[in-house]
Image: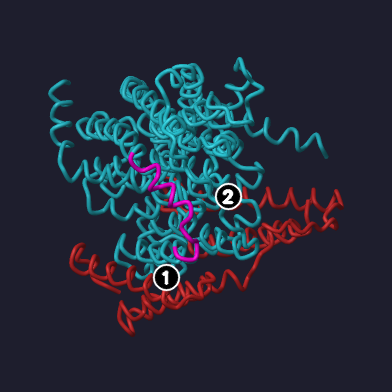
Amino acid sequence: MLQKDVILYGGLLVVSLLLVFWLIPAFCPPHPGYGMPPSLLPTVVVAIIMVISAVNLILTLKNKTFKEKTHEEGKKVFFLNLLKFVIPSFLLMPAMQYIDFIPAGLLFMFVIQFFAGQRNYITMTIVSVSVVVPVYFLLRYVVSVPLP
Amino acid sequence: MWETIIGAIDIAMTPVGILYIILGVSIGVFVGAVPGINGPMAVALTLPISYYIPTEVAVGFLVGIGKGSFFGGSIPGVLINTPGTPESVPTTWEGYQLSKQGKAGKAMKMALYASVSGDVVATLVLILCAAPLASVAMYMGPSEMFALICFAMTLIAGVGAKSVSKGIIAGALGIFVATIGIDPVTSMPRLTFGITELERGIPLIPVAIGMLAFSEIILELERRSKTKEEIKCIMVSSSKENNSITFKEYWQNIKAIIRGSAIGVGIGALPGVGAPVAAFLGYDNAKKASKKPEEYGKGSLEGIAATESANSAVAASALIPLFVLGVPGNLIAALLIGAFMMHGILPGPLMFQQNEQMIYSIYFYLVIASGLLIIIGNIGIRVFGKCVQAPPKIIYPIVLFTCLIGSYLAQTSTFDVFLMVFFAFIAYFMKKFDFNVVCFLIGFILAPIWEISLQQVISLSMNNYTMFFTRPVAMILMILTFWVIIKTIKPKIKSI
């Protein structure tokens, strides 16, 4: 077991407890008196997560092998790298509403290509235009869907 | 019956329908050929298109992508020693060795013919077996359905995931997410946390795109930025002998192809086991049965034939449990449930009664897709061979943009795009912590059917929760479920 497993199962245990004792009872409709209570299935599945997390947490702590910290390259979380792609993606739709589909799309493609390691600005322009403009015409005139 | 079949072919035989199948197979081979992109990812991305085309065409198109990707995955394996998909790893072991001998074309042709052979066998088994099995499955009530889904999910968590406990947690999380929305009994919002957009539930498309495509591309970009690896592509020889497979060579490997196809059909028909298991089993079995086992690892055509026939057979055979029981055989089949549901059809034995003509149209498209794969594969080996060198810096941003537009397109909802990015974020961490996203997705897709079955059992039995143990089939399935759980956790308990 790794040290990160302690954090993982501990976190899962806390979230499951919050769900079972607070969020599920608070945000599920009351039992109408027939059939299955609306809160039963969510409670059962979260209880399963809770039990497994608790068992794994106890086993990890009992074995005391959690101190053996290994650095598997593929398993390391690179927050900055994740945010580089997630933040522009979250902003794309609001940007499309404010500055229109094509400018926002082109800007997004430029930013993402830059973060993906592309430094040739001519290629970036060609790729951005050849993707965003046909998608705009496809959505607007072929599929005829309301644009964001 | 013949009238129905002829009617179904008549409906399916449209230029638009055939065009979609050609497009599906071509997209499949393309995505298989580009390392880092795979079949389920492409199916998730193209799922929104299903809204705009008839059900049978949508299913044919999506299965076409799956069929194409199984073969396409072998191309980068042979040319650059990098498997395009997990199921083409054994093909890479043999194919790259043949490439170094100047026989890349021969290796790819063998992969193509074996893929098509395995696929044809599986399609025939599907056509011949699904309807009779469905008529038996008609006798299954809600308690049997509930027990069957329990069994399928345990099997997926036990076999499909690296860690059983993590597989079960992922599946349970998928079920929990699926319970968000309107409660089926009270018709009141459940777990929506006051967010109005969540009252319609969490749709499949943004979840599938986020978890399968978006998160995977971010991980690929991360991996590539760390390794800075260069693609060294072996060029295909111009000699005709090294670029073709003679009938004699094909016939010499026929036993491996038949065995591989049989393994693929068997594995595909089991819920959730998937093509990689079939490919490795097929390869291993062929090696053990081979007269020349010493050739394995040095460029054996037999190894390629066994692997490719086994993994391609999964594409069609995974539809057997889907059509018969409504339980998916692999991830692509799970995503097909979404395509069916978009058109108001619930996969399962009732389809054979209520949508018989549609089923035969789907069969027709599956056969057409197999034929087209051999044509597209033959024409496109050189063209798709170039795809393996496609720069990720260009391809991946395009895929990310397509993910965002695809999520929006499904229901023209901006909220769906946010959901997609959110689930991509979740999937990134799940993959980093070794949680199987396939378990999550299958739990998410099967949860509504599971909950309805449970509701029906409880209503019918007047709140008697022991009803599963009073019906023989349900009881056997529940016992099997517990057996799988005990069998998979036993070694872990022993090791403590």
Amino acid type at image mark 1: Ile
Is B322 positioned to the left or the right of A27 in the image?
left
Can residue B312 be seen at all in this image of the molecule? yes
Q: Which residue is mark 1?
A: B195
The residue that appears at 25% across and 32% down in the rendered structure is: B359
Is B348 positioned to the left or the right of B10 in the image?
right
Q: In which quarter of the view is residue B131 placed?
A: top left
The residue that appears at 85% across and 52% down in the rendered structure is: A65
Chain shown in red: A
Amino acid type at image mark 2: Ala
Measured Cα–Cα span from mark 2 to mark 1: 24 Å
Q: In which quarter of the view is residue A101 placed?
A: bottom left
Chain shown in cyan: B
Q: Is residue B159 above or below residue B383?
A: above
Contact (CB < 8 A) between labels 2 and 1? no
Instruction: Respond whether the residues carrying marks 2 and 1 are from the same subunit.
Output: yes
